[in-house]
Image (cartoon, rainbow, N blue to C red):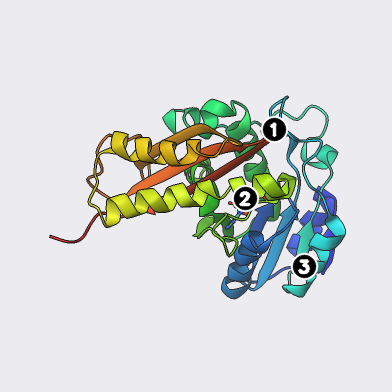
């Protein structure tokens, strides 16, 4: 496995690859969610490149850039075991050289709502770094998790707007055995908070059940039931619960077609997001 730390090094490593290349962009502190993307890339492509870069431009000033978990040795071990060809692990100076001014932004409601409303710099940072990674690595396919549902849709939109020749492949959310969505940030949770965080997958399950078995279509009633469930847990605060169109992420008041349920919670000082699909009741 080739570990490359500079853009020039990545350029020459890329030039030496023939056949289809898959890229998995990550911020490291890898878990099985990341590895599911790597395995899919491995199955689809001749060569797999994984980037490990904690991207400073997507963190707000009050956020966890300094404390974000980092463990390059462990990450490299895991990626080597998955048969990854190249790990691209650039420094901040390589990704953002002095005078850097190639910001890539998706405008409109898709980036202004939900995560965009709570983290104003976030999507501009994500689209800028992903566009730069795609231009450097030039993969045929790039892999993203449905765990970050809004990010996935923003990246797809960015790729379309920028005319980048890459297929974006989405993979389902990988969960812990008790249902909690895997996240590098789960490492922040104390034992009590880890237990409290289970209200996220449970609230999703509750809503799924109301819609898919109970035939509930009214979003206000759905949200009320979820809020009641989550509020029983004093360590947890709700940033948002939203039921939206699956593609545009526009909020819905009534569920008349499959919809996406997105939630963002704060468990102590840790911010967690999760989401799930709400299919319609198929019974007559
Ligand atoms: P991150 O390192 O958090 O930036 O995530 C890198 C990629 O892994 C993103 O495309 C995420 O959506 C994806 N990812 C993170 N957690 C999960 C998960 N639990 N299941 C599937 N994909 C995930």
- Are dots 3 and 1 in contact, CB under 8 Å? no
For mark 3, what is the residue? 78
Is the residue 86 above or below the residue 186 in the image?
below
CA–CA distance in space, label 3 to label 2? 27 Å
97 horizontally vs 224: left or right: right
User: Label 3 crowding class (10 Å Cα cut-off): few <14, some 14-19, many 20+?
Assistant: some
Residue 104 can be seen in this image: no
Is the residue 106 above or below the residue 144 in the image?
above
In the image, 161 versus 53, the foreground residue is 53
Residue 259: percent from left, percent from top:
33, 47
Instruction: Identify the residue at horizontal 80%, vertical 39% (top origin).
Output: 67
Q: Secondary structure at mark 1?
A: loop
Give the position of the C terminus as an image quadrant.
Answer: bottom left
CA–CA distance in space, label 3 to label 1? 26 Å
132 horizontally vs 173: left or right: right
Front of the two marks 3 and 2: 2
Residue 272 can be seen in this image: yes
For mark 1, what is the residue? 59
Occupied quadrant, residue 268: top right
Instruction: Identify the residue at horizontal 22%, vertical 51% (top origin).
Output: 215
CA–CA distance in space, label 1 to label 2? 26 Å
Residue with the most extreme left position = 284
Instruction: Identify the residue at horizontal 46%, vertical 29% (top origin).
Output: 113
Front of the two marks 1 and 2: 2
Occupied quadrant, residue 281: bottom left
Residue 156: percent from left, percent from top:
49, 47
Disc 2: residue Cβ within 8 A of ligand 1's nearest atom: no
Q: Earlier in the sequence, mark 3 or mark 1?
A: 1
- Are dots 3 and 2 in contact, CB under 8 Å? no
Residue 130: percent from left, percent from top:
63, 45
For mark 2, what is the residue? 195
Q: Earlier in the sequence, mark 3 or mark 2?
A: 3
């Amino acid at each position: 496995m080739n570990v490359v730390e500079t853009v020039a090094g990545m350029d020459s490593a890329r030039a030496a690859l023939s056949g289809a290349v898959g890229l998995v962009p990550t911020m490291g502190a890898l878990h099985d969610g990341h590895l599911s993307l790597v395995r899919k890339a491995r199955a689809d492509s001749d060569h797999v490149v994984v980037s490990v870069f904690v991207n400073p431009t997507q963190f707000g000033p009050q956020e966890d850039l300094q404390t974000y978990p980092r463990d390059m040795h462990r990450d490299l071990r895991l990626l080597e075991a998955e048969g990854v060809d190249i790990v691209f692990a650039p420094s901040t100076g390589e990704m953002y050289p002095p005078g850097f001014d190639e910001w890539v932004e998706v405008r409109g409601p898709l980036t202004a709502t939900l995560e965009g409303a709570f983290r104003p710099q976030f999507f501009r940072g994500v689209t800028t770094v992903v566009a730069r990674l795609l231009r450097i690595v030039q993969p045929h396919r790039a892999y993203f998790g449905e765990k970050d549902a809004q990010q996935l849709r923003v990246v797809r939109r960015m790729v379309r707007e920028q005319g980048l020749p890459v297929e974006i492949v989405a993979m389902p959310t990988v969960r812990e055995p008790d249902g909690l969505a895997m996240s590098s940030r789960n490492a922040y949770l104390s034992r009590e908070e880890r237990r409290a965080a289970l209200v996220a997958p449970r609230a999703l399950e509750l809503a799924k059940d109301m819609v898919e078995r109970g035939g509930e279509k009214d979003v206000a009633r759905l949200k009320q039931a979820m809020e009641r469930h989550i509020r029983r847990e004093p360590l947890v605060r709700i940033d948002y619960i939203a039921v939206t169109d699956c593609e545009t992420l526009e909020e819905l008041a009534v569920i008349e077609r499959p919809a996406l349920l997105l939630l963002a919670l704060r468990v102590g000082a840790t911010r967690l997001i999760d989401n799930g699909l709400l299919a319609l009741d198929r019974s007559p």
